[in-house]
Image: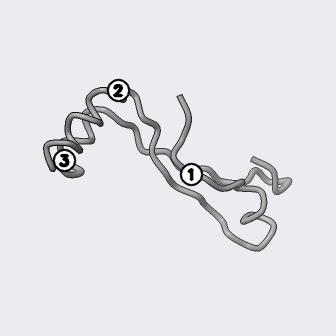
Amino acid sequence: MYTSAGIVPEVLFNRGVTMVGGVKIMDADKIMQVVSEGGGTPALRLAMNFVSIRPNKNGDM
């Protein structure tokens, strides 16, 4: 599984961004069901994890 961020965090970190956030899909079938039924974040939370990425002290992830 992958996070939803469609960017390379290092590019942002090199420009002063201190944190990138997104979600990691844990149950794609459940996500598709909730979205197709018009559900929102409360229902989606059951099938995903929120993630935050910060650079380490060297500026890398």
Q: Find out whether the residues at labels 3 and 1 contact each other: C-beta distance under 8 Å.
A: no
Question: SS of the residue at dot 1?
Answer: loop
Viewer-side label of 3, 1: 1
Name which residue lies at 61% across and 50% down. 53
Which numbered disc, 3 or 2, marks the residue that appears first in the sequence?
2
- Coloring applied to the structure: one colour
The residue that mark 1 highlights is: 5
Q: Estimate the spatial distance between the alpha carbons at disc 3 and disc 2, rounded to whole Å.
A: 15 Å
Q: Amino acid at mark 1?
A: Ala
Please provide percent x and percent y for residue 24.
46, 38
Q: Residues within 10 Å of mark 2 (few under 14, many from 20)?
A: few
Give the amino acid type for the residue marked by disc 2 in the picture: Asp
Locate residue 17: give its quadrant.
bottom right
Q: Which residue is mark 2?
A: 27
Outermost right residue: 58
**Residue projecting furthest to the front:** 36
- Mark 1: give few (<14), some (14-19) or many (20+) Cα within 10 Å: few
Q: Nearer the viewer, mark 3 or mark 2?
A: 2
- Above or below, comparing residue 17 to residue 25 in the picture: below
* Residue 20, x across and y down, in percent: 58, 58
The span from disc 1 to disc 2 (Cα, nearest Å) is 17 Å
